[in-house]
Amino acid sequence: MARCATCSAPLAANTQVCRYCGVRNDIDLHGKQDFRVVDAGRRRQCPQCGIGLQTVALNREADLHIERCAQCFGLFFDPGELEALLDGSVAQVADFNLPLLQNINRERYQPERPVKYLRCPVCQVLMNRMLYGYQSGVVVNRCRSHGVWLDNGQVSHLLEWKRAGGQLLDRKKTAERQARAGGETAKRAFSSEYAAASSGRAASGESEVLEAIAAVVFKLFE
């Protein structure tokens, strides 16, 4: 469990403000990642606080630079940077632990948190809210063109999710969806070809043969 950097009191999951001393804590980078501010030009704007974002370099990954709000500690990742952070911080796992994934989400899920649509720090267009990965329990704000915004605490949640095999489970589910989609596409193509062929053979016995073949093929795609 994370602790307050000021008074050392325990912080509840996904909570950054200490209930004892009221100090706001950085629970994603502080004590977990070595980082340094490399650009305080603040060309990008925090969608939560409205102030300029710092650019910080993660020392673990020399070429990984992300934007960080010095007030709410939210993080903005350019496309591919969040995946690079997860891959560089957590070793690959051999299997997923479904009970642990469920426990992580039960502990960290905040049903009372209001839904809020945020503007992209780069283009200022409203971002889409989306679930990051299967059973991650983390809803992020994503701009298709410029990247993804995570509130403070969400990176810690995703690190636990990956350690429990969540990323592996997500890839498995993605492969299953793609296989089903491919099967449906092949099934529709066969149906179209079968309809065209049977219309020209309706008067002959070949129609019954085609129907038998179609039944077998459809069974393969189920």
Image (spheres, grey):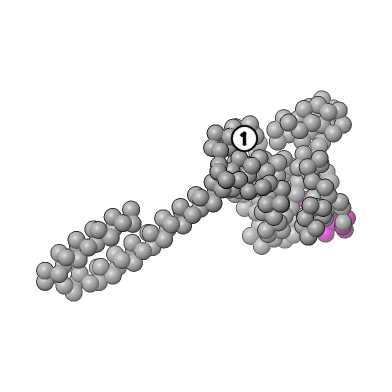
What is the three-letter code of the residue carrying label 1?
Answer: Ile
Q: Does 41 lie within the magenta span?
A: yes
Q: Report if residue 166 is visible in the image.
A: no
Look at 55% across and 34% down and name the residue there.
Answer: 99
Q: Position of residue 68 (x, y in %)?
A: 80, 50
Q: Where is mark 1, residue-wise? A: 104
Q: Report if residue 100 is visible in the image.
A: yes
In the picture, measured across the screen, residue 98 lies left or right of residue 222, that is right
The rendered magenta stretch, by its main secondary structure, is classed as: loop
In the picture, measured across the screen, residue 3 lies left or right of residue 125, that is right
- Rendering quarter of residue 6: top right
- Rendering quarter of residue 147: bottom right
Please give the range of residues in magenta.
39-47
Look at 67% across and 58% down and name the residue there.
Answer: 80
Say if 197 sits above or below 77 in the image.
Answer: below
Q: Position of residue 65 (x, y in %)?
A: 79, 57
Q: Position of residue 207 (x, y in %)?
A: 16, 67
Quarter occupied by the N terminus = top right
Look at 68% across and 46% down and name the residue there.
Answer: 90
Camera-nearest residue between 74 and 3: 3
Q: Position of residue 221 (x, y in %)?
A: 33, 57
